[in-house]
Amino acid sequence: MGQQQLLLIVLGVIIVGIAIAVGISMFKSSAVDANRSAVASDLANLASKAQRYYRTPIELGGGGNSFANFALSPLDTGNANGSYRVEILTGDQKVVIHALGKERIGNNYVAAIDCVTADASRIYQGVATGLQTTDADKGYGTLQGWTPQ
């Protein structure tokens, strides 16, 4: 009877260990998904600011139908979800907002870009690879695996 009880205890410990491992994996997956959603929401908000700047006349502090001098305020360059930076493309009619999330997928960070024009905004999500620790705070790295949202 003692061996049977010992076997049941060992089996119980194994089952509990597996349950804990699965729970940790599910929590991590949920954290990554939540960070992706939060970064996409932030990008949509920043795209709205960019479009508002584009439509505002120069006399009122806007771009006057140009993204030429659009920049993020210091408060908009980072928050609990990630860090953000702006790239104005040639012709001043398109701006790309880069986002780097705080969550990691293996060695890669959650990342997204938002391609903004006067009338449209399209978010692409993926991962950022090849980042050093100091680069992650700046939003640099090779971005790959983009999927439209």
Image: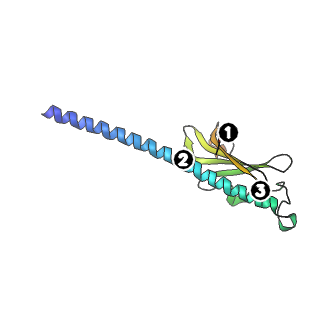
Indicate the quadrant where residue 57 lies. Answer: bottom right
Would residue 23 appear left or right of 84 to someone viewing this image? left
Is the residue under label 1 in contact with that under label 2 (CB below 8 Å)?
A: no
Where residue 34 sits in the image (x, y, percent)?
54, 50
Determine the CA span between mark 2 and mark 3: 28 Å
Q: Residue drawn 83% across and 65% down?
A: 61
Mark 1, secondary structure of its residue = strand
Residue 143's label in the rendered image is: 1
Earlier in the chain: of badge 2 and badge 3, it is: 2
Q: Is residue 121 above or below residue 52?
A: above
Which residue is tagged 3?
71
Instruction: Spot the residue most to the front.
Output: 119
Q: Position of residue 77 (x, y in %)?
A: 69, 55
User: Do the CB atoms of the residues marked 2 and 3 lie less than 8 Å apart?
Assistant: no
Nearer to me, 110 or 48: 48
Residue 6 at x, y = what percent?
19, 35
Q: Earlier in the sequence, mark 2 or mark 1?
A: 2
Of all residues, the one furthest to the left in this rendering is 1
- Left or right of 25 in this view: 4: left
Badge 3 element = loop
